[in-house]
Amino acid sequence: MRKDTKNSSVNTKHPILSVAPMIDWTDRHCRYFHRLLTPNALLYTEMITTGAILNGNHDRLLGFSPEEHPVALQLGGSDPADLATCAKIGEDYGYDHINLNCGCPSDRVQKGKFGACLMAEPQLVADCIGAMRATVSIPVTVKCRIGIDDSDDYPFLENFIKTVSSTGCDTFIIHARKAWLKGLSPKENREIPPLRYDIAATIKKNFPQLTLILNGGLTTLAQVTENIGYFDGIMIGREAYQNPYFLTALEHHFFNIPQPDRMDICHAMVDYIARQDGSIHSVTRHMLGLFNGLRGARHFRQVLSTDTHTPDIVAKDIMEKALSYFEPGHSDN
Ligand SMILES: Cc1cc2nc3c(=O)[nH]c(=O)nc-3n(C[C@H](O)[C@H](O)[C@H](O)COP(=O)(O)O)c2cc1C
Protein backbone atom coordinates (compact mmCIF):
# COMPACT_ATOMS: atom_id res chain seq x y z
CA MET A 1 0.00 0.00 0.00
CA ARG A 2 1.14 3.58 -0.57
CA LYS A 3 2.85 5.02 2.47
CA ASP A 4 1.17 8.44 2.14
CA THR A 5 -2.21 6.98 3.09
CA LYS A 6 -0.90 5.86 6.48
CA ASN A 7 -3.13 7.10 9.23
CA SER A 8 -1.84 9.49 11.85
CA SER A 9 -4.72 8.62 14.24
CA VAL A 10 -3.56 5.05 14.81
CA ASN A 11 -1.29 3.83 17.60
CA THR A 12 1.42 1.93 15.76
CA LYS A 13 3.54 1.43 18.87
CA HIS A 14 0.91 -0.47 20.84
CA PRO A 15 -1.62 -1.72 18.29
CA ILE A 16 -4.57 -3.84 19.32
CA LEU A 17 -3.62 -7.49 18.91
CA SER A 18 -6.27 -10.17 18.67
CA VAL A 19 -6.60 -13.86 17.90
CA ALA A 20 -9.49 -14.60 15.56
CA PRO A 21 -12.65 -16.53 16.42
CA MET A 22 -12.27 -19.99 14.87
CA ILE A 23 -14.91 -22.70 15.15
CA ASP A 24 -13.58 -25.95 16.61
CA TRP A 25 -10.25 -24.28 17.31
CA THR A 26 -10.52 -21.32 19.73
CA ASP A 27 -12.28 -23.13 22.57
CA ARG A 28 -11.44 -22.39 26.19
CA HIS A 29 -8.43 -24.73 26.27
CA CYS A 30 -6.96 -23.13 23.18
CA ARG A 31 -7.50 -19.67 24.61
CA TYR A 32 -5.80 -20.62 27.87
CA PHE A 33 -2.80 -21.83 25.86
CA HIS A 34 -2.76 -18.71 23.69
CA ARG A 35 -2.91 -16.49 26.74
CA LEU A 36 0.37 -17.95 27.97
CA LEU A 37 1.91 -16.81 24.68
CA THR A 38 0.23 -13.44 24.34
CA PRO A 39 -0.57 -11.46 27.48
CA ASN A 40 -1.91 -8.49 25.50
CA ALA A 41 -4.10 -9.97 22.78
CA LEU A 42 -7.87 -9.91 22.87
CA LEU A 43 -8.94 -13.55 22.49
CA TYR A 44 -12.19 -14.60 20.84
CA THR A 45 -14.51 -17.52 21.39
CA GLU A 46 -15.64 -19.64 18.50
CA MET A 47 -18.86 -18.29 16.98
CA ILE A 48 -21.73 -19.39 19.21
CA THR A 49 -25.23 -19.09 17.77
CA THR A 50 -28.08 -17.48 19.63
CA GLY A 51 -30.04 -20.73 19.18
CA ALA A 52 -27.32 -22.69 20.99
CA ILE A 53 -27.20 -20.23 23.87
CA LEU A 54 -30.97 -19.92 24.22
CA ASN A 55 -31.47 -23.70 24.22
CA GLY A 56 -28.16 -25.10 25.47
CA ASN A 57 -26.08 -25.57 28.59
CA HIS A 58 -24.55 -22.21 29.42
CA ASP A 59 -21.63 -23.51 31.47
CA ARG A 60 -20.59 -25.88 28.69
CA LEU A 61 -20.95 -23.25 25.98
CA LEU A 62 -19.76 -20.15 27.78
CA GLY A 63 -17.61 -21.21 30.71
CA PHE A 64 -13.97 -20.05 30.68
CA SER A 65 -10.99 -19.58 33.00
CA PRO A 66 -10.34 -16.15 34.52
CA GLU A 67 -6.78 -16.26 33.12
CA GLU A 68 -8.19 -15.98 29.59
CA HIS A 69 -9.28 -12.34 30.01
CA PRO A 70 -9.77 -10.26 27.97
CA VAL A 71 -12.11 -12.47 25.93
CA ALA A 72 -14.70 -11.50 23.32
CA LEU A 73 -17.78 -13.65 22.87
CA GLN A 74 -18.63 -13.94 19.18
CA LEU A 75 -22.33 -14.40 18.49
CA GLY A 76 -24.01 -15.73 15.36
CA GLY A 77 -27.57 -14.61 14.85
CA SER A 78 -29.82 -12.03 13.22
CA ASP A 79 -32.73 -11.56 15.58
CA PRO A 80 -32.18 -8.35 17.57
CA ALA A 81 -34.10 -9.54 20.66
CA ASP A 82 -32.34 -12.93 20.75
CA LEU A 83 -28.96 -11.29 20.25
CA ALA A 84 -29.67 -8.81 23.04
CA THR A 85 -30.63 -11.68 25.39
CA CYS A 86 -27.49 -13.63 24.50
CA ALA A 87 -25.25 -10.58 24.78
CA LYS A 88 -26.59 -10.04 28.31
CA ILE A 89 -25.98 -13.68 29.19
CA GLY A 90 -22.42 -13.27 27.87
CA GLU A 91 -21.88 -10.09 29.86
CA ASP A 92 -23.13 -11.80 33.01
CA TYR A 93 -20.68 -14.64 32.34
CA GLY A 94 -17.86 -12.12 32.43
CA TYR A 95 -17.02 -11.65 28.76
CA ASP A 96 -15.23 -8.40 27.99
CA HIS A 97 -16.66 -7.75 24.50
CA ILE A 98 -19.52 -9.02 22.37
CA ASN A 99 -18.84 -9.44 18.64
CA LEU A 100 -21.37 -10.09 15.88
CA ASN A 101 -20.31 -12.44 13.08
CA CYS A 102 -21.01 -10.84 9.69
CA GLY A 103 -18.31 -12.76 7.84
CA CYS A 104 -18.99 -16.50 7.90
CA PRO A 105 -20.16 -17.80 4.50
CA SER A 106 -21.07 -21.42 5.37
CA ASP A 107 -24.35 -22.86 4.04
CA ARG A 108 -25.49 -23.69 7.56
CA VAL A 109 -25.01 -20.12 8.65
CA GLN A 110 -26.76 -18.75 5.56
CA LYS A 111 -29.77 -20.98 6.23
CA GLY A 112 -29.98 -19.40 9.67
CA LYS A 113 -29.71 -15.99 7.93
CA PHE A 114 -26.61 -14.83 9.72
CA GLY A 115 -22.87 -14.55 9.12
CA ALA A 116 -21.65 -12.96 5.86
CA CYS A 117 -25.09 -12.77 4.23
CA LEU A 118 -25.95 -10.10 6.82
CA MET A 119 -23.69 -7.70 4.92
CA ALA A 120 -26.55 -7.40 2.40
CA GLU A 121 -28.79 -6.10 5.19
CA PRO A 122 -26.93 -3.31 6.94
CA GLN A 123 -30.08 -1.93 8.57
CA LEU A 124 -30.83 -5.31 10.15
CA VAL A 125 -27.24 -5.47 11.45
CA ALA A 126 -27.68 -1.95 12.83
CA ASP A 127 -30.88 -3.06 14.59
CA CYS A 128 -29.05 -6.08 16.05
CA ILE A 129 -26.14 -3.97 17.27
CA GLY A 130 -28.53 -1.30 18.60
CA ALA A 131 -30.49 -3.92 20.58
CA MET A 132 -27.30 -5.39 22.07
CA ARG A 133 -25.81 -2.01 22.90
CA ALA A 134 -29.02 -1.03 24.67
CA THR A 135 -28.79 -4.17 26.83
CA VAL A 136 -25.12 -4.48 27.80
CA SER A 137 -22.48 -2.04 28.95
CA ILE A 138 -19.46 -3.86 27.45
CA PRO A 139 -18.31 -3.02 23.88
CA VAL A 140 -20.30 -4.52 21.01
CA THR A 141 -18.26 -4.94 17.83
CA VAL A 142 -18.67 -6.33 14.29
CA LYS A 143 -16.49 -8.70 12.27
CA CYS A 144 -17.20 -8.55 8.55
CA ARG A 145 -15.75 -9.08 5.09
CA ILE A 146 -15.09 -6.33 2.52
CA GLY A 147 -18.08 -7.54 0.52
CA ILE A 148 -20.12 -10.49 -0.69
CA ASP A 149 -20.64 -11.94 -4.17
CA ASP A 150 -20.75 -9.15 -6.76
CA SER A 151 -21.27 -6.53 -4.07
CA ASP A 152 -17.58 -6.03 -3.49
CA ASP A 153 -16.87 -2.41 -4.32
CA TYR A 154 -15.86 0.26 -1.84
CA PRO A 155 -19.29 2.01 -1.73
CA PHE A 156 -20.95 -1.27 -0.67
CA LEU A 157 -18.62 -1.63 2.32
CA GLU A 158 -18.80 2.07 3.11
CA ASN A 159 -22.61 1.95 3.24
CA PHE A 160 -22.46 -1.09 5.55
CA ILE A 161 -19.96 0.57 7.92
CA LYS A 162 -21.82 3.89 7.85
CA THR A 163 -25.19 2.30 8.63
CA VAL A 164 -23.90 0.04 11.37
CA SER A 165 -21.66 2.64 12.99
CA SER A 166 -24.64 5.02 13.21
CA THR A 167 -25.76 2.86 16.17
CA GLY A 168 -22.64 3.89 18.07
CA CYS A 169 -20.72 0.71 17.22
CA ASP A 170 -17.16 2.01 16.92
CA THR A 171 -15.08 -1.11 16.29
CA PHE A 172 -14.98 -3.18 13.12
CA ILE A 173 -12.77 -6.13 12.35
CA ILE A 174 -12.46 -6.46 8.60
CA HIS A 175 -11.44 -9.76 7.03
CA ALA A 176 -10.06 -8.07 3.93
CA ARG A 177 -11.45 -10.36 1.27
CA LYS A 178 -14.99 -10.77 0.05
CA ALA A 179 -17.00 -13.95 0.51
CA TRP A 180 -18.74 -15.86 -2.24
CA LEU A 181 -22.00 -17.08 -0.73
CA LYS A 182 -22.51 -19.76 -3.37
CA GLY A 183 -19.99 -22.14 -4.87
CA LEU A 184 -17.08 -21.85 -2.44
CA SER A 185 -16.62 -23.77 0.79
CA PRO A 186 -15.76 -21.78 3.94
CA LYS A 187 -12.15 -22.95 3.56
CA GLU A 188 -12.01 -21.79 -0.07
CA ASN A 189 -13.61 -18.53 1.02
CA ARG A 190 -10.57 -17.97 3.25
CA GLU A 191 -8.17 -18.57 0.38
CA ILE A 192 -9.57 -17.77 -3.06
CA PRO A 193 -11.04 -14.25 -2.97
CA PRO A 194 -8.06 -11.87 -3.15
CA LEU A 195 -6.97 -9.89 -0.12
CA ARG A 196 -7.74 -6.16 -0.47
CA TYR A 197 -6.07 -4.41 2.45
CA ASP A 198 -6.40 -1.17 0.47
CA ILE A 199 -10.21 -1.25 0.71
CA ALA A 200 -10.06 -1.81 4.47
CA ALA A 201 -7.47 1.01 4.78
CA THR A 202 -9.75 3.39 2.87
CA ILE A 203 -12.47 2.74 5.43
CA LYS A 204 -10.07 3.73 8.22
CA LYS A 205 -9.05 6.83 6.28
CA ASN A 206 -12.66 7.90 5.72
CA PHE A 207 -13.88 6.92 9.21
CA PRO A 208 -10.90 7.96 11.37
CA GLN A 209 -13.04 7.93 14.51
CA LEU A 210 -13.67 4.18 14.17
CA THR A 211 -11.36 1.51 15.53
CA LEU A 212 -10.42 -0.63 12.54
CA ILE A 213 -8.79 -4.03 12.96
CA LEU A 214 -7.27 -5.71 9.92
CA ASN A 215 -7.69 -9.47 9.47
CA GLY A 216 -6.77 -11.92 6.74
CA GLY A 217 -3.53 -13.46 5.56
CA LEU A 218 -1.22 -11.91 8.16
CA THR A 219 1.48 -14.50 8.82
CA THR A 220 4.76 -12.63 9.37
CA LEU A 221 6.02 -9.83 11.57
CA ALA A 222 7.19 -7.97 8.47
CA GLN A 223 3.70 -8.04 6.98
CA VAL A 224 2.15 -6.88 10.23
CA THR A 225 4.58 -3.99 10.66
CA GLU A 226 4.11 -2.97 7.03
CA ASN A 227 0.35 -2.71 7.41
CA ILE A 228 -0.07 -1.60 10.99
CA GLY A 229 0.18 2.11 10.20
CA TYR A 230 -3.14 2.03 8.36
CA PHE A 231 -5.12 0.32 11.11
CA ASP A 232 -5.66 0.38 14.86
CA GLY A 233 -4.80 -3.26 15.24
CA ILE A 234 -4.59 -6.67 13.72
CA MET A 235 -6.35 -9.99 14.13
CA ILE A 236 -4.43 -13.20 13.47
CA GLY A 237 -6.31 -16.41 12.66
CA ARG A 238 -4.71 -19.51 11.17
CA GLU A 239 -1.11 -18.50 11.83
CA ALA A 240 -1.88 -18.10 15.54
CA TYR A 241 -3.30 -21.61 15.64
CA GLN A 242 -0.86 -23.41 13.38
CA ASN A 243 2.26 -21.58 14.52
CA PRO A 244 1.30 -20.23 17.95
CA TYR A 245 4.82 -19.09 18.88
CA PHE A 246 4.30 -16.33 16.28
CA LEU A 247 2.19 -14.61 18.94
CA THR A 248 5.27 -14.21 21.12
CA ALA A 249 7.10 -12.44 18.29
CA LEU A 250 4.26 -9.92 18.08
CA GLU A 251 4.29 -9.43 21.86
CA HIS A 252 8.03 -8.93 21.81
CA HIS A 253 7.95 -6.47 18.95
CA PHE A 254 5.01 -4.33 20.07
CA PHE A 255 5.05 -4.70 23.88
CA ASN A 256 8.65 -5.61 24.59
CA ILE A 257 7.55 -8.81 26.34
CA PRO A 258 10.39 -11.38 26.42
CA GLN A 259 9.62 -14.47 24.37
CA PRO A 260 8.84 -17.31 26.80
CA ASP A 261 10.59 -20.67 26.73
CA ARG A 262 8.40 -23.19 24.91
CA MET A 263 9.24 -25.83 27.54
CA ASP A 264 7.89 -23.56 30.30
CA ILE A 265 4.68 -23.14 28.31
CA CYS A 266 4.37 -26.94 28.08
CA HIS A 267 4.86 -27.36 31.82
CA ALA A 268 2.24 -24.69 32.52
CA MET A 269 -0.15 -26.58 30.25
CA VAL A 270 0.50 -29.82 32.14
CA ASP A 271 -0.55 -28.02 35.34
CA TYR A 272 -3.64 -26.74 33.54
CA ILE A 273 -4.55 -30.22 32.27
CA ALA A 274 -4.32 -31.56 35.83
CA ARG A 275 -7.09 -29.13 36.81
CA GLN A 276 -9.44 -30.20 33.94
CA ASP A 277 -12.04 -32.97 33.81
CA GLY A 278 -11.94 -33.65 30.06
CA SER A 279 -9.51 -35.68 27.97
CA ILE A 280 -5.86 -34.73 27.69
CA HIS A 281 -6.23 -34.67 23.93
CA SER A 282 -8.92 -31.97 24.10
CA VAL A 283 -6.20 -29.66 25.43
CA THR A 284 -3.03 -30.89 23.72
CA ARG A 285 -4.61 -30.86 20.24
CA HIS A 286 -4.23 -27.06 20.30
CA MET A 287 -0.52 -27.22 21.08
CA LEU A 288 0.70 -29.27 18.12
CA GLY A 289 2.27 -26.33 16.29
CA LEU A 290 4.21 -24.93 19.26
CA PHE A 291 7.60 -26.14 18.05
CA ASN A 292 6.95 -25.58 14.33
CA GLY A 293 10.12 -24.95 12.40
CA LEU A 294 12.35 -26.56 15.03
CA ARG A 295 14.08 -29.90 14.92
CA GLY A 296 11.89 -32.38 16.83
CA ALA A 297 8.62 -30.60 16.00
CA ARG A 298 7.28 -33.63 14.14
CA HIS A 299 7.83 -35.94 17.09
CA PHE A 300 6.27 -33.44 19.47
CA ARG A 301 3.17 -33.34 17.27
CA GLN A 302 3.08 -37.13 16.96
CA VAL A 303 3.33 -37.82 20.67
CA LEU A 304 0.76 -35.20 21.57
CA SER A 305 -1.71 -36.35 18.96
CA THR A 306 -1.43 -40.14 19.36
CA ASP A 307 -0.26 -40.99 22.91
CA THR A 308 -2.93 -38.73 24.37
CA HIS A 309 -5.58 -41.29 23.35
CA THR A 310 -4.01 -44.04 25.52
CA PRO A 311 -6.26 -44.89 28.49
CA ASP A 312 -5.00 -43.91 31.97
CA ILE A 313 -2.10 -41.97 30.56
CA VAL A 314 -0.80 -39.03 32.63
CA ALA A 315 -0.26 -35.65 30.96
CA LYS A 316 3.09 -35.11 32.69
CA ASP A 317 4.46 -38.37 31.25
CA ILE A 318 3.27 -37.62 27.75
CA MET A 319 4.76 -34.16 27.87
CA GLU A 320 8.09 -35.51 29.11
CA LYS A 321 8.14 -37.92 26.19
CA ALA A 322 7.16 -35.22 23.69
CA LEU A 323 9.83 -32.87 25.00
CA SER A 324 12.53 -35.54 25.20
CA TYR A 325 13.16 -35.05 21.49
CA PHE A 326 14.46 -31.56 22.20
CA GLU A 327 17.06 -32.74 24.69
CA PRO A 328 20.66 -32.23 23.63
CA GLY A 329 22.00 -35.23 21.74
CA HIS A 330 18.65 -36.36 20.38
CA SER A 331 19.16 -36.38 16.64
CA ASP A 332 15.94 -38.02 15.46
CA ASN A 333 13.51 -35.86 13.45
C1 LIG B 1 -11.09 -23.36 11.42
C2 LIG B 1 -11.59 -21.96 11.26
C3 LIG B 1 -12.78 -21.59 11.88
C4 LIG B 1 -13.26 -20.28 11.76
N1 LIG B 1 -14.37 -19.92 12.46
C5 LIG B 1 -14.75 -18.60 12.50
C6 LIG B 1 -15.78 -18.16 13.37
O1 LIG B 1 -16.33 -18.91 14.18
N2 LIG B 1 -16.12 -16.85 13.30
C7 LIG B 1 -15.51 -15.96 12.46
O2 LIG B 1 -15.84 -14.78 12.46
N3 LIG B 1 -14.53 -16.36 11.64
C8 LIG B 1 -14.12 -17.65 11.66
N4 LIG B 1 -13.05 -18.03 10.90
C9 LIG B 1 -12.35 -17.02 10.08
C10 LIG B 1 -11.20 -16.38 10.92
O3 LIG B 1 -11.70 -15.72 12.05
C11 LIG B 1 -10.42 -15.37 10.06
O4 LIG B 1 -11.29 -14.34 9.70
C12 LIG B 1 -9.85 -15.99 8.79
O5 LIG B 1 -9.22 -17.25 9.06
C13 LIG B 1 -8.84 -15.06 8.12
O6 LIG B 1 -7.78 -14.77 9.00
P1 LIG B 1 -6.35 -15.52 8.84
O7 LIG B 1 -5.93 -15.36 7.40
O8 LIG B 1 -5.44 -14.80 9.80
O9 LIG B 1 -6.57 -16.95 9.19
C14 LIG B 1 -12.56 -19.33 10.98
C15 LIG B 1 -11.37 -19.71 10.36
C16 LIG B 1 -10.88 -21.00 10.51
C17 LIG B 1 -9.57 -21.38 9.85
Image: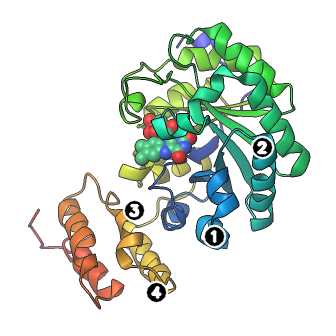
Instruction: Please report whichever mark, 2 or 1, sits nearer to the chain's N-terminal start.
Output: 1
> Residue 264 location, x and y as percent?
42, 74
Residue carrying label 2: 140
Residue at 18%, 73% in the rendered image: 328
Please indicate, yes or no, whether residue 208 appears anywhere in the rendered image.
no
Look at discs 4 and 1 and give the one toward the viewer.
1
Instruction: Please report whichever mark, 2 or 4, sits nearer to the chain's N-terminal start.
Output: 2
Q: Amino acid at mark 2?
A: Val
Helix, strand or loop for disc 3: helix
Helix, strand or loop for disc 1: loop
> Residue 322 location, x and y as percent?
24, 74
Q: Amino acid at mark 1?
A: Asn
Residue carrying label 4: 274
Q: Which mark is residue 286?
A: 3
**Labels 3 and 1 touching (C-beta < 8 A):** no
**Does the closest atom of ligand 1 sit within 8 Å of the Cβ of label 3?**
no
Residue at 86%, 52% in the rendered image: 136
Q: Nearer the viewer, residue 272 or 149?
A: 149
Instruction: Please report whichever mark, 2 or 3, sits nearer to the chain's N-terminal start.
Output: 2
Q: Residue furthest left?
A: 332
Look at discs 2 and 3 and give the one toward the viewer.
2
Query: Neighbour class for label 1 at 10 Å: few (<14), some, many (≥20)?
Result: few
Q: Quadrant of the C terminus?
A: bottom left
Q: Which mark is residue 89?
A: none
Residue at 52%, 31% in the rendered image: 225
Q: Which mark is residue 57?
A: 1
Distance Cα–Cα, label 2 vs label 3: 28 Å
